[in-house]
């Protein structure tokens, strides 16, 4: 049976009832799409990884080689996923029996699962992608991998056969979104079908083998109510954020890497009216909006000749010709901030974006610096006046040193005093101490502002009474804490 090559279709007959005629042939069957996975604020505890001996990987390599010599991949690609798994399991069980490998039942089940993942999915990554408590996956070559669980980075029990298998999996991931990674184009940003963000840097830039980093989403979409449950914000603060999203305030979400900016942006967009036309611009499409009228745009890197690049600025400028009511930029990194600010104060109220910054004041400085990056020779005061006329609210997200994520500021941009932009905080988060387990203790408190600058917008949308109730309740709780 195993003496015949894979191109001999008599080597392993396939069940005719399993063939899916509508499925076109492909080199390898694609893995099933997963549900969208926004990032978690408080992941569940991780299950301990089980170490495998080197002999397991040696046996797996030999079985996999025999499998490839036996099956016809072109026929396997015509099967649906479950039928293909059954075929692979049958053949692997035959190989183990004929080759007389000494394996426990648990090892045999692990082997069957691993080989199915290698052929049909993302190989050793599949168990990590299936876990909902992992926020980040970091693969440093074929022999070393780490994951972020509960805000902490720990080593994972994941190994690849060799660097070539890892590079093949990276190529499989990026090819699904029409991109490529190889020696001529060794750096690539991509995404998984569920929207999880992927970065690959391949040899020769990566000395010890391909480096794969995945920012993973949870299967269930987080809401503001869940963020309240995790302690990211108080119920009163969540109510104010709902109103901010509803009444078309121009919002910038500021925060460091991994602080939950995209998660919070997803939460805010849930409160946009169903009849609004929304256009999103992203480097990698991550946002999962629930409204019916959403147009999703994504940047494009240059081709191998260095041509054909579509930048974020190109997308934002083109948005203005697409009759948007709201423009949402997944991440503002450069001169496109000027075009977004121009859109915010020319009839596209309620636009949103995220920026890497550690405080609301630093966020304003970053916007000013990014406008300068675009080569605009505008006076500093004029730039600040554009920012003041465009941005209504800055929401600051932070990831604390114990791994927890908190909304630390809800800040309004008020105006100018001389050459300085003035702001006022509606909500702040104070760190009070640390418990015996190393968890930081803190509290959200209202600053006592009873009439925020967006009050007129709230009244226009009949949200003024709810806003007043939320501010009163927050101030009352803050007085009790004192």
Image (cartoon, helix red, strand yellow):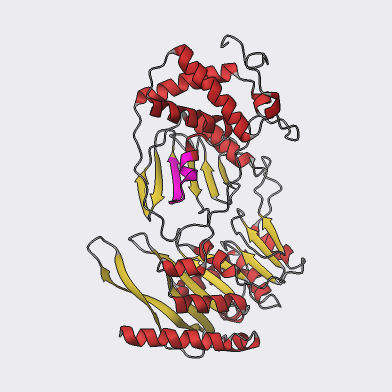
User: Quick one: 281 or 109, which is closer to the camera?
Assistant: 109
Please identify the quadrant where the N terminus is shown.
top right
Residue at 55% over, 67% down? 267
Q: Where does the image place residue 323, in percent across and percent down from the top left? A: 77, 69
Q: Where does the image place residue 219, in percent across and percent down from the top left? A: 53, 53
Residue at 63% over, 86% down? 462
User: Quick one: 388 or 60, which is closer to the camera?
Assistant: 60
Whether 450 is drawn above or below 125: the answer is below
- Quarter of the figure with residue 373: bottom right
Please identify the quadrant where the C terminus is shown.
bottom left
Outermost residue, top direction? 3
User: Quick one: 135 or 348, which is closer to the camera?
Assistant: 135
Residue 453 in view here: no
Q: Is residue 288 left or right of residue 480?
A: right
Q: Is residue 482 left or right of residue 473?
A: left
Residue 306 in view here: yes
Residue at 65% over, 75% down? 344
- Quarter of the figure with residue 245: bottom right
Q: Which contiguous range is marked in magenta?
A: 127-139
Residue 84 painted magenta? no
Q: Where does the image place residue 404, in percent across and percent down from the top left? A: 38, 62
Outermost residue, left direction? 436
């Amino acid at each position: 049976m195993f003496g015949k090559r894979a191109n001999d279709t008599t080597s392993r007959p396939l069940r005719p009832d399993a063939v899916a005629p509508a499925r076109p042939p492909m080199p390898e069957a694609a893995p099933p799409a997963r549900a969208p996975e926004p990032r978690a604020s408080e992941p569940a505890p991780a299950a301990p990884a089980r170490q495998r001996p080197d002999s397991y990987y040696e046996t797996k390599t030999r079985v996999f080689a025999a499998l490839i010599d036996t099956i016809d991949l072109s026929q396997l690609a015509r099967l649906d996923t479950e039928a293909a798994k059954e075929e692979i399991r049958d053949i692997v069980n035959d190989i183990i029996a004929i080759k007389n490998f000494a394996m426990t039942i648990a090892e045999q089940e692990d082997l069957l699962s691993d080989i199915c993942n290698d052929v049909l999915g993302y190989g050793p990554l599949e168990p990590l992608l299936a876990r909902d408590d992992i926020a980040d996956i970091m693969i440093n070559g074929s022999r070393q991998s780490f994951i972020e669980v509960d805000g902490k980075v720990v080593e994972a029990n994941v190994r690849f056969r060799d660097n070539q298998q890892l590079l093949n999996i990276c190529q499989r991931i990026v090819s699904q979104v029409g991109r490529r990674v190889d020696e001529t184009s060794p750096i690539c940003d991509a995404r998984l079908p569920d929207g999880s963000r992927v970065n690959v840097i391949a040899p020769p830039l990566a000395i010890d083998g391909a480096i794969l980093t995945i920012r993973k989403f949870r299967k269930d979409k987080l809401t503001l109510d869940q963020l309240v449950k995790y302690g990211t914000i108080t119920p009163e603060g969540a109510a104010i954020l709902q109103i901010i999203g509803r009444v078309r305030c121009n919002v910038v979400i500021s925060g460091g890497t991994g602080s939950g900016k995209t998660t919070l942006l997803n939460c805010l967009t849930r409160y946009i009216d169903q009849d609004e036309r929304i256009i999103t611009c992203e480097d990698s499409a991550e946002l999962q909006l629930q409204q019916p009228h959403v147009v999703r745009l994504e940047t494009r890197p240059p081709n191998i000749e260095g041509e054909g690049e579509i930048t974020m600025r190109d997308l934002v400028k083109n948005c203005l010709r697409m009759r948007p009511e709201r423009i949402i930029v997944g991440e503002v990194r450069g001169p496109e901030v000027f075009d977004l600010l121009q859109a915010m104060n020319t009839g596209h109220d309620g636009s949103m974006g995220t920026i890497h910054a550690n405080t609301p004041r630093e966020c304003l400085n970053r916007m000013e610096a990014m406008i300068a990056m675009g080569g605009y020779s505008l006076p500093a005061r004029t730039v600040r006046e554009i920012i003041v006329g465009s941005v209504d609210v800055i929401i600051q997200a932070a990831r604390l040193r114990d791994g927890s994520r908190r909304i630390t500021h809800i800040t309004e941009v008020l105006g100018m005093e001389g050459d300085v932009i003035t702001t006022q905080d509606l909500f702040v988060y104070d760190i009070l101490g640390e418990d015996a387990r190393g968890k930081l203790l803190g509290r959200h408190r209202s600053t006592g502002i009873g009439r925020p600058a967006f009050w007129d917008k709230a009244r226009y949308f009949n949200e003024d009474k709810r806003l007043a109730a939320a501010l009163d309740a927050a101030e009352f709780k803050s007085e009790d804490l004192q």
